[in-house]
Image: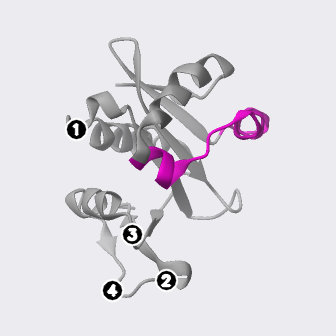
Amino acid sequence: MEMRPFVREDFETYRLWFVDPVLDRELGPLDHDWLEYVLSESPPKEFCFFENDKLVAVIGTESPEPETASWYITAIAVDPARKRQGIGRRAVETLIENYSTQTSAPQEWIAFVSKTNIGARSFFRELNWFESVEAEPDDMFKFSLEMNT
C-alpha cells in the first residue's frame, strides 16, 4: 500500500465516496472549506492510501504538540465500494509504520470514536486497540495503541 499526503487532485474522487450515507453521516459534510483547511496544514495531517494506483482510503491525523508522544487518528475513510476487504487495516498499519521510522515517532496512537459508530468501534477492536471502559465526554470512546519502545 502506498501512502502520501492528501492533495487537491484527490478531492473529486474522495468527495464521491460521501454519497454513501454512513460515511457522510460519520465524517461529512465534505466541502471545499474542508479541502482548503486540509491543504493549508503544515506538516500535512491528512493522508491518502493507494492500491494499484487507486485511492482506497484517507486517514486524518493530529498531534497536539510536536513533542508529544501521542498522535491521534481523527478520521478513517475507506472507499465504500471496497469495504470489508482489509483496506482500513492495511492503511492504519501503513500509517503507523511510516511514522515509526521518524525520530520523533509516536509512543501511542489514540482514536476517539462516537458511541453510535458501531462499525468504527468494531474496527478498532479487531485491530486489538485498547478500548476505554467508559465513554469519554461527548459520548466518545477512546481507543489506544501503545507502541513498543
Q: Could you tell me how far apart the alpha carbons at marks 1 and 3 are, in whole angstroms? A: 22 Å
Residue 118: which quarter of the image? bottom left
* In magenta stretch: residue 135: no
Q: Could you tell me how far apart the alpha carbons at marks 3 and 4 are, in whole angstroms? A: 15 Å
- Quarter of the image where the N terminus is located: top left
Question: What's the magenta region?
Answer: 22-44
> Residue 132: x percent and y percent?
36, 81
Residue 100 visible in the shown view: no
User: Which amino acid lies under the numbered mark 2 shown in the image of this protein?
Assistant: Glu
In this figure, which residue is indicated by the disc labeled 1? 86
Q: Could you tell me how far apart the alpha carbons at marks 1 and 4 are, in whole angstroms? A: 26 Å
In this figure, which residue is indicated by the disc labeled 4? 133
> Do residues under tags 3 and 2 come within 8 Å of each other at their CB atoms?
no
Q: Crowding near pointer 3: few (<14 within 10 Å), some, many (20+)? A: few
Q: For the residue labelled by badge 4, is the local secondary structure a helix, a strand or a loop?
A: loop
Q: Residue at x 77, y 39 (%)?
A: 33
Q: Nearer the viewer, mark 1 or mark 3?
A: 3
In this figure, which residue is indicated by the disc labeled 3? 116
In this figure, which residue is indicated by the disc labeled 2? 136
User: Which amino acid lies under the numbered mark 3 shown in the image of this protein?
Assistant: Thr
